[in-house]
Amino acid sequence: MKTLILVNGELYKPDILRSRIRAEEFDLILGADGGARYACSLSVHLDAIIGDMDSFSDLEYKSSSKIKLVSYPAEKNETDLELALLYAVEQGADLIVMVGVMGGRMDMTIANIMLIAQANFNQSRIEVWHGEQTGWIIKPPGEDISGYPGDTVSLIPLDGDVSGIITEGLKYILKDEELTFGFARGLSNLLEKPTATIKLSKGLLLAVHTPGRA
């Protein structure tokens, strides 16, 4: 099941996001609290709004009988996005796409990105869409990345040093090597073929694919 989550950050390149969303068929569309306000901009209809509702005051949505409200107290351990992700997983989502993940608050942006590495969500593939860019986690043994020659691909270690990395189809190749946490060696590589292969034996990589040279 494909799920779209609208997050209460900044909506980057909404025209591009609207086209990408239109090209998919999402079975479930969620608003993570204030992210629900982006439904009109993205031409989607919400199935549910998740969170403590502290950033959401649109009475039109609140009074709509077609939108489910899953409300939590303001004092809680989880962010509204984390609760929306948990809800999506409980509904059986195997692909979750998040938009509006980044924004003015640095702490929230970092926390939102780090959420996709949580073990609680391992059964689902989670993607961050930021305009035309896509971010996701690559776990052992690895996977292929599709695109066009000249696209930018960055590989960022998330949980300490990531080892046993072998790449094919990228300009700067790795041969059973390590990417060290906190260093930028894996940034701004380039696809040389329509498909690149990324293999790794240990750790988690945050992959970011940007069409064209970034």
Image (cartoon, rainbow, N blue to C red):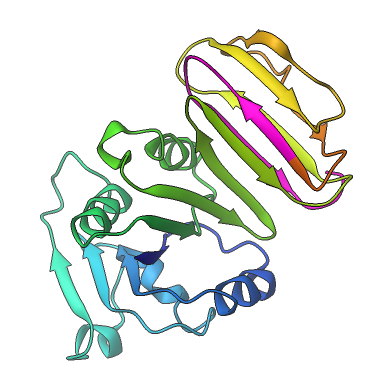
| Residue at the image point whose x is 45% and y is 18% from the top | 159
Front residue (pair 58, 18)? 18
| Residue at the image point whose x is 48% and y is 84% from the top | 40
- Is the residue 176 above or below the residue 195 in the image? above
Residue 64 rendering spot, x and y as whole percentages: 22, 91
Tell me how many marks there are: 0
* Boundaries of the magenta span: 196-214
| Residue at the image point whose x is 30% and y is 70% from the top | 56
**Residue 116 shown left or right of residue 183 in the figure:** left
Residue 132 rendering spot, x and y as whole percentages: 70, 59
- Is the residue 27 above or below the residue 61 in the image? above
- Is the residue 175 above or below the residue 51 in the image? above
Front residue (pair 112, 126)? 126
Quadrant of the rendered image containing residue 91? bottom left
Residue 97 rendering spot, x and y as whole percentages: 46, 58
Front residue (pair 99, 148)? 148
- Is the residue 186 above or below the residue 35 in the image? above
Confirm whether the magenta stretch covers residue 134: no
Front residue (pair 176, 37)? 176
| Residue at the image point whose x is 53% and y is 42% from the top | 136
**Residue 156 shown left or right of residue 159 in the figure:** right
**Residue 42 shown left or right of residue 60 in the figure:** right
Residue 76 rendering spot, x and y as whole percentages: 14, 44
Q: Quadrant of the N terminus?
A: bottom left
Q: Quadrant of the C terminus?
A: top right
